[in-house]
C-alpha cells in the first residue's frame, strides 16, 4: 500500500473515444484516492463517465492518459497480456445484470473465478462454500442462476467477486435489477464487507444506495463535480 | 477445466451431437477408404515378400494367358548367374468375367510349389505331388467362396474359340489341400499341375510368366538386364523394379481413395468450425466475463479449443468404431464372393484418431482465437 494509506490512486485519468472522426471525452483528468476498507459510491447522470472510470480501474479498457495505482502498483503501465493477472489478483467485479454463467451452479460460478487464479481444487471448494454460506446461500449452492432470485444471483456474484481476495471490489449498478427489499440486503452486505476491511467502489444511480456509502463522488461531463464524505443525509445534485 | 468443457458441450446436445456425427462420418470414410488402401499395401507387400529372391520374366505383351514358350525357360537357364527358372500359367477362373478381383487358376510344376509359396502353410490336406493330374490346392479365399474342404470337387471351365464359336470344356478337380490365409495373390489361386493346365486350356507348352532364381551372390538388377539382352521378346523385372512399378500404381489408388476420405473429413472439420463459431458468438458475454474475472488468453484458448478437440476425439472414436464394424461385415460379405478388400491396421486406427483430434483442434483454433482476443469491455456489453 502507498505511504498515504491509499489502496487505489487515480491520477489525471482521461479517456477519449473516437465517434467516427469526432473525439468524445468520456473522462477528463480525473484524480482521487481511495483508502482500504472505504465504501465509496460514484454517482452521476448517464454519460457522465462513471462506468468508463470503473472499466479503466478494472483494466477492462485502457486510458488515453493518466495512471491507476492499486496497492501502490501502477497497473495502467502493464501490458495487455499482464492485465488478466492484475484483474484476478486485485479486482473483483459485481455487475448490474449479475453476469453469472447460466450453465453453472452457484457453487461453480464462484469456483470458476478461482480456477483462473490457479487455486488448488480443495482450497477452491472450501472458499466457495465459505463465501456462499456468508452470503446466506448455503442451501442454494447447487442451484443454477435460473433457479435463483435476483437478490440471490447478486449475492452469488458478490461471492464470486470476493473469491480471490481482491484489493478492490468494483460494483457497477449492483442494485439496478433488484427490488427495494433486496437492494437493502445487497447494500448492507457490501457495507458489512467494507467494515471488515474490503474496499468497495459502487457506481449507482440510486440515491438510497449512495447515502449508505462512506463517500460519494459525483461525476459530470467526465469530471469530478463533487467528492464528499457522508456524515448524515447528503443531498445529491443531478444524480439518478 | 475439463468438466467445464463437458458442461458446455452437453448444454447444446443436439448441436454437439450433429457436429460429432459430421466428424464421425468423415473418419468413417477415412477408415473405409484407408482400410482399402491398407489392404492393397499389405497385399502387395506380402506378395512381394514371397518374391524377393526372384526375377520375373514376362512376355512383352503382358502376363495373363500362355504366351511364353517353355523353350524360353531353357534359354534363360543358359544365362550366366541363373540358378533356376520355371514357368507359371495364370488363367482367370471365370473366363467370362475378367476383372480386378476374382480367382485364378495357376498351373505350377508340383516340384516348384515350395520355391514359389515358400513357407505358406496348409489349413488342411496336402500340396500337389508329382504325378497328380486332376488335383487342386486352393487359396483360402477360394475355399471360402466355394465353401470347399479337402476332398471336395471343384468345377473348372476352359473356353476356346473354334471356327467363330466358343467351346467350353468343364473338368472337375479334386481339392487336395487348402492354403492358409496369406494376404497375397495366392489367396485367390486354384493351383493345379502345370502340364494338366496346359492340356486343359489347350495352349501347348506355354506359360504366362517365368520366375528366375539368381545364383547366390549375383546382383538381381544386373542379372535381369542380362536376361533381357540374351533372350528376345521378353521383359525381365528384378524384385526391386517390380516393387517400384507396383508402388507407383498404389500411389495412384491411395491418392484417389484417401483424397475422397479427406474431403469427407474436412467437411466434418468445417462443421466443427461452424459450430464453434456459433458457440463462441453466443457466449461472447461469458468470455467477456471470464476475462473480467482474470481469465488469460490461454484459459480461453484451452476452453474453446478443448471443446472442439473433444468433439474431434468423440467423432474419431465413433467413426473408427463404425468404420471397423462396417469393414468387418463387408469383409465377411466379400469373402463369400472370394474377395477381401479391406484391412484394419493399428497404423490406420492411430492415423484416423490423430486426424480426428487434429481436425477438431485446428477447426477450433479460429473461433478460440476470436474468443480469446475479444475486448472484455465490448464482450460484456454484447447482447
Image (spheres, coloured by chain):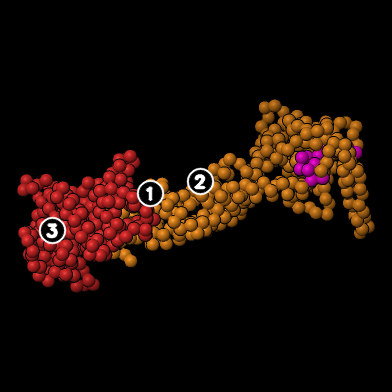
Chain colours: A red, B orange
User: Percent x, y for residue B99?
Assistant: 76, 53
Q: Earlier in the sequence, mark 1 or mark 2?
A: 1
Stretch in magenta = B134-146
Closer to us: A126 or A69: A126
Q: Nearer the viewer, mark 1 or mark 2?
A: 1
Q: Which residue in the protein does label 1 denote?
A: B302
Q: Subunit of mark 1? A: B
- The CA distance from mark 3 to mark 2 is 59 Å
Whether discs 1 and 2 lie on one chain: the answer is: yes
- Give the side of residue A66 with respect to residue B109, left or right: left
Checking the image for residue B354, the label placed there is: 2
Residue A212 location (% of width, % of height): 13, 59
* Whether marks 1 and 3 lie on the same chain: no
Task: Identify residue for label 3.
Answer: A213
Q: Secondary structure at mark 3?
A: loop
Count residues near mark 3 (Cα–Cα under 10 Å), then give few for <14, some for 14-19, many for 20+: many
User: Residue at position x 38%, y 62% from top?
Assistant: B281
Residue B254 appears in the figure: no
Q: Is residue B135 magenta?
A: yes
Amino acid at each position: 500500500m502507498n505511504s498515504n494509506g491509499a489502496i487505489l490512486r487515480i491520477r489525471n485519468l482521461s479517456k477519449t473515444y473516437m465517434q467516427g472522426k469526432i473525439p468524445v471525452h468520456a473522462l477528463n483528468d480525473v484524480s482521487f484516492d481511495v483508502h482500504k476498507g472505504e465504501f465509496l459510491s460514484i454517482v452521476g447522470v448517464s454519460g457522465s463517465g462513471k462506468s468508463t472510470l470503473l472499466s479503466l480501474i478494472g483494466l477492462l479498457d485502457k486510458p488515453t492518459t493518466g495512471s491507476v495505482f492499486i496497492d501502490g502498483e501502477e497497473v495502467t503501465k502493464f501490458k495487455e497480456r499482464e492485465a488478466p493477472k492484475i484483474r484476478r489478483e486485485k479486482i473483483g467485479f459485481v455487475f448490474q445484470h449479475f453476469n453469472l454463467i447460466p450453465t453453472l451452479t452457484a457453487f461453480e460460478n464462484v469456483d470458476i473465478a478461482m480456477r483462473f487464479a490457479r487455486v488448488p481444487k480443495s482450497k477452491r471448494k472450501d472458499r466457495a462454500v465459505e463465501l456462499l454460506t456468508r452470503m446466506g446461500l448455503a442451501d442454494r449452492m447447487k442451484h443454477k442462476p435460473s433457479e435463483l432470485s435476483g437478490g440471490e444471483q447478486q449475492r452469488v456474484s458478490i461471492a464470486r467477486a470476493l473469491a480471490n481476495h481482491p484489493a478492490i471490489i468494483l460494483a457497477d449498478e449492483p442494485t439496478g435489477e433488484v427490488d427495494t427489499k433486496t437492494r437493502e440486503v445487497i447494500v448492507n452486505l457490501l457495507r458489512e464487507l467494507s467494515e471488515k476491511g474490503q474496499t468497495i467502489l459502487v457506481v449507482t444511480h440510486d440515491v438510497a444506495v449512495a447515502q449508505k456509502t462512506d463517500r460519494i463522488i459525483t461525476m459530470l461531463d467526465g469530471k469530478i463535480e463533487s467528492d464528499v464524505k457522508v456524515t448524515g443525509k447528503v443531498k445529491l445534485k443531478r444524480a439518478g | 477445466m475439463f468438466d467445464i468443457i463437458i458442461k458446455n458441450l452437453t448444454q447444446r446436445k443436439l448441436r454437439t451431437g450433429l457436429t460429432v456425427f459430421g466428424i464421425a462420418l468423415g473418419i468413417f470414410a477415412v477408415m473405409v477408404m484407408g482400410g482399402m488402401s491398407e489392404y492393397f499395401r499389405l497385399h502387395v507387400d506380402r506378395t512381394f515378400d514371397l518374391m524377393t529372391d526372384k526375377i520375373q520374366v514376362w512376355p512383352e505383351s503382358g502376363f495373363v494367358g500362355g504366351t511364353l514358350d517353355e523353350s524360353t525357360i531353357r534359354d534363360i537357364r543358359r544365362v550366366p548367374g541363373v540358378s533356376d527358372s520355371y514357368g507359371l500359367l495364370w488363367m482367370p477362373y471365370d473366363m467370362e468375367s475378367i476383372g480386378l478381383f476374382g480367382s485364378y487358376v495357376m498351373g505350377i510344376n508340383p516340384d516348384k510349389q515350395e520355391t514359389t509359396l515358400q513357407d505358406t502353410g496348409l489349413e488342411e490336406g496336402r500340396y500337389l505331388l508329382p504325378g497328380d493330374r486332376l488335383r487342386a490346392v486352393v487359396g483360402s479365399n477360394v475355399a471360402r467362396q466355394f465353401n470347399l474342404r479337402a476332398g471336395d470337387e471343384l468345377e473348372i471351365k476352359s473356353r476356346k474359340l473354334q471356327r467363330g464359336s466358343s467351346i467350353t470344356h468343364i473338368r472337375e478337380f479334386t481339392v487336395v489341400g487348402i492354403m492358409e490365409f496369406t494376404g497375397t495373390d495366392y489367396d485367390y489361386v486354384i493351383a493345379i499341375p502345370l502340364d494338366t493346365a496346359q492340356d486343359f486350356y489347350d495352349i501347348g507348352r506355354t506359360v504366362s510368366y517365368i520366375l528366375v532364381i539368381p545364383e547366390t551372390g549375383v546382383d538381381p538388377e544386373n542379372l535381369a538386364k542380362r536376361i533381357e539382352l540374351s533372350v528376345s521378346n521378353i521383359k525381365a523385372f528384378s524384385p526391386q523394379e517390380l516393387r517400384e512399378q507396383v508402388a507407383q500404381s498404389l500411389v495412384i489408388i491411395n491418392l484417389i481413395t484417401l483424397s475422397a476420405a479427406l474431403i469427407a473429413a474436412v467437411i466434418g472439420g468445417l462443421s466443427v468450425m461452424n459450430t464453434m463459431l456459433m458457440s463462441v458468438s453466443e457466449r461472447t458475454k461469458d468470455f467477456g466475463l471470464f476475462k473480467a474475472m482474470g481469465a488469460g488468453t490461454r484459459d480461453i484458448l484451452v476452453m474453446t479449443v478443448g471443446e472442439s478437440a473433444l468433439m474431434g476425439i468423440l467423432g474419431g472414436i465413433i467413426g473408427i468404431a463404425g468404420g471397423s464394424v462396417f469393414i468387418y461385415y463387408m469383409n465377411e460379405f466379400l469373402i463369400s464372393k472370394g474377395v477381401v478388400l479391406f484391412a484394419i491396421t493399428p497404423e490406420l486406427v492411430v492415423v484416423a484418431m490423430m486426424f480426428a483430434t487434429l481436425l477438431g483442434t485446428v477447426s477450433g483454433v479460429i473461433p478460440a482465437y476470436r474468443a480469446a482476443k475479444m475486448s472484455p469491455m465490448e464482450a460484456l456489453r454484447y447482447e
